Image: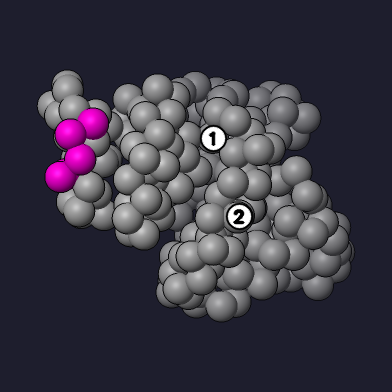
Amino acid sequence: MPLHLAGDLFSILCALIGVGCAALLWKVTRPERDPQRICEYLRQELHNSPGDAQKRFEYAKALYGQGYMTAASHELRQSLEIDHQNPEAHYLLGNILLLTGNVHAAGAHFEKATQLSPAFAEAHHSWGTVHELSGDLPAAEDAFLRSIAIDPKYGIAYFNLARLYAATNQTAKSREKLNQAIKLDPMFHEEALCCSDFDNMLSDKNMRQLLYRSA
């Protein structure tokens, strides 16, 4: 569930904390258009309600969006101590752990997120990434496939399936998934050109045509 911080402030707020809270904060922060002030506002709200798991989670998301990973991790752990049934909190903490190289711990949180919210496509995808990094390619494939079954327009899952199939010399499957990814977002064409995982597929004429048709 990537947090996109481009665009006007209301879009930023929606990405960080959801539409409901964004509508409220829009009134507070509109004059200055300063995401830092959003964090400060949420910090004050949390100070007034330290036992509110949702407010702590919202503050953690704001910190995450600003790149304060250590602080966000702390707040997410505190939030989960109060409410351990929040799949988004598990997912976000898993992302931070994965970024810092703690693959096993990240996997536990992604798994928990999928258990709490079985239709959470991003969590299934991230859990697949953990399986891939751990060398369990069949489990990674299953997780990526679950992700796109939930969200057929989730391009990165198609791309990573294409990588996975390339690594296991399944050329036709790799080409199919890469083509689907590129159709969803042309950015994946450039990603594929820079990705060494597809190098062993270049002997396949159709794969070469797919990779270099618009290079």
Q: Secondary structure at mark 1?
A: loop
Do we see residue 46 in this rendering?
no
Residue drawn at x 44%, y 69% is: 133
Mark 2 nearby-residue class (10 Å; few <14, some 14–19, many ≥20)? many
**Residue 167 image offset from top left, x and y in percent:** 33, 58
Q: Which residue is mark 1?
A: 154
Do we see residue 177 in this rendering?
yes
**Residue 120 image offset from top left, x and y in percent:** 71, 46
Q: Quadrant of residue 190?
A: top left
Q: Which mark is residue 143?
A: 2
Q: Name the image quarter holding the N terminus.
A: top right
| Residue 188 vertical position relative to residue 26 in the rendered view, above or below | below
Span colored in magenta: 202-206
Q: Secondary structure at mark 2?
A: helix
Residue 186 as seen in the image, left or right of residue 200: right
| Residue 108 vertical position relative to residue 167 in the rendered view, above or below | below
Residue 67 among magenta residues: no
Residue type highlighted by circle 2: Ala
Q: Nearer the viewer, residue 111 or 46?
A: 111
